[in-house]
Image: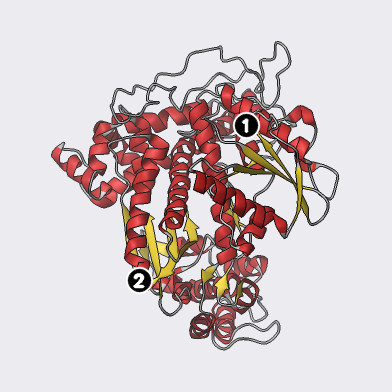
Amino acid sequence: MKPMHIVVAAAEPGTWVLRVVSPDGERAGDDLTVTDAEFPRLVAQREGAAHRAGVAPPVWTWLDTSAPAALLNTAGVWVMRCRDLGLCSTILTTASTAPGSGATAAPAPSGSTGPGATSNTGSPRAGDGRQGTTTATDPESNAPHPLDYQPVVDPPDPRHVPGSRAPVAANQGSLFAVASETGPGVDELTAELAAQTRACASARNPARMERLLGLESQGALVAEEMRHRGIPWNAEVHRAILEDLLGPEPRGEERPARMQELAEQVRTVLAAPTLNPDSPVELLKALRNAGVDVDTTRAWKLKDWTLVNGQPQEQRVAVVAPVLEYKKLSRVFSATGWHWLQTWVQDGRFHPEYVVGGVVTGRWAARGGGALQIPKYIRDAVRAEPGRALVVADAAQLEPRVLAILARDDALAEASRGRDLYASIAEQGRARGTELTERADAKIALLGAMYGATSGAAGRFMPQLMRLFPRAVGYVEHAARVGERGQQVCTYLGRWSPAPGPEWFEVQRATDTEAGEHRATREARSHGRFSRNFVVQGSAAEWALAWLGHIRQGLHRAGLDAQLVFFLHDEVMVDCTAEHAEQVRELVVDAAEQAVRTVFGTVPVEVPVATNVVTSYADAK
């Protein structure tokens, strides 16, 4: 039996309207209006009543998780699950542009053959060559392959921007841009929920799509809870690190002392006494005048210039060394300097703003503060408070292991089991008499296959990798070919890649000249590289969402004084009392195993998680 939803809509400022409905939007009682102060108490009562009765709690359904979650987190009220209609609409709207998805954002015009059409006819899917047993015990193992596609008959509608929060109930009007201060009302949100339920039901695999929407919404709860709690941050340690690197805190617009010294060195070695090293235009001009033949001031380009026949040339190194050091310290000053500390760290906590699904593959992004980029040099400032500990965990070689599941490659699955995947591949390479005999080479080859590297060492080792793991390599190659044709691919649970824009298709048609043909080939291959990575990275992101959800639920059920405070793709941090650290560590490891089953079913592929219990993030790795 499906749980009931409680639709929550903002009404007048400071008030909310609540409506109990079935997933298809059928009302089950009168609406209720509550104030900001009353809302958390009502939620706590409903959650508590469901728990005492041993029944599934309601699904709190709202346009955007941030506002209601802020009230709940401040009041210390915990909810089991929610439905973020905005995030779910993004997924379903993009899916509706893929003819093979089955999901539609709105009824398609009669006879339509474009991206919004509901028809699932057309050419059969391309053969994927899978014969393995990697998901043999998954009850959904006979579901269509994640790379199923239908030919794109027409270019996408240029009015549609994949990934935008257009409503699934498109015929209801501009649900996510209602011209009012309070946003869409309870009637509009109820209609949106019903439309999303229908879209899931028509999807190629409704169960997987529902699971994806549930995980995405759970992720929204986790993100808001982590923003509310914040990462423990020792401001004094942070300042000490800055002073060690940059010198004393500068006044006003002054540069830190160490940067000023380097600025003078740069002017001297480049013979440019008035140079402003913070200006890329001035710096590039000065470099060229000094004989540094580069077309950009990027650090990697300057480092390349120092090499002669692959080896650093001492005279060249002397010219660019102060430039590189200045750029390094400039990044420290701008990214995590004193201004950052004053802006983002309050009362000993860094409160980042995560953007769930901020990347088209489903990975998270961050809004300001650099939450997803805590550099190594500053990690010692992430300190547990006295009597507490940080449990830091990261999944080892997540994406290659996910590829083994997706491709149903039993050989790669065996290589991943209970050991370092890249070392295992090297062992198999030696046993099979291939050139792929070193761990470093195995890593380059497998990552190259997933990211589309065709030159250098990755390209050289690709034939050996194909010999060892033909299904895995064939899977990503098939995804690339689909992308090169301008078609869409999807993750395991059903997040579809956005279609190329109309300009891409124009380029593909403009092949009447040699230059046009080269450009079309280049753009096609670029989209192919995007597609081959999308299926793996996106499916790995689904595992990560499930991992976060199981950790969140497990910590709550165990009643531990422990909170998720940080997440980065395949890494989490839990802030807990020192006495609970070992229990938290075991829970995090178990959650990783549960996440595999939640997303992929029972598979012979392990996703090992390395854990460390520390008091400083700098000691975690």
In the figure, 83 relative to 144: above or below?
below
Q: Residue at x 36, y 56 (%)?
A: 587
Image quadrant in which you'd find residue 599: top left
Spot occupied by residue 376 in the image (x, y as percentages of width and height): 44, 69
> Observer-nearest residue: 338 or 284?
338
Residue identified by numbered label 2: 579
Q: Amino acid at mark 1?
A: Pro
> Observer-nearest residue: 499 or 549?
549
Q: Residue at x 59, y 62 (%)?
A: 76
> Observer-nearest residue: 299 or 332?
332
Q: Residue at x 54, y 62 (%)?
A: 293
Whether residue 454 is visible to the viewer of this picture, yes or no, is no
The quadrant of the image that shows the C terminus is bottom left
Residue identified by numbered label 1: 23
The colour scheme used to paint the residues is: secondary structure
Whether residue 611 is visible to the viewer of this picture, yes or no, is yes
Q: Amino acid at mark 2?
A: Glu
Precedes in sequence: disc 1 or disc 2: 1
- Quote the CA–CA distance across marks 1 and 2: 42 Å
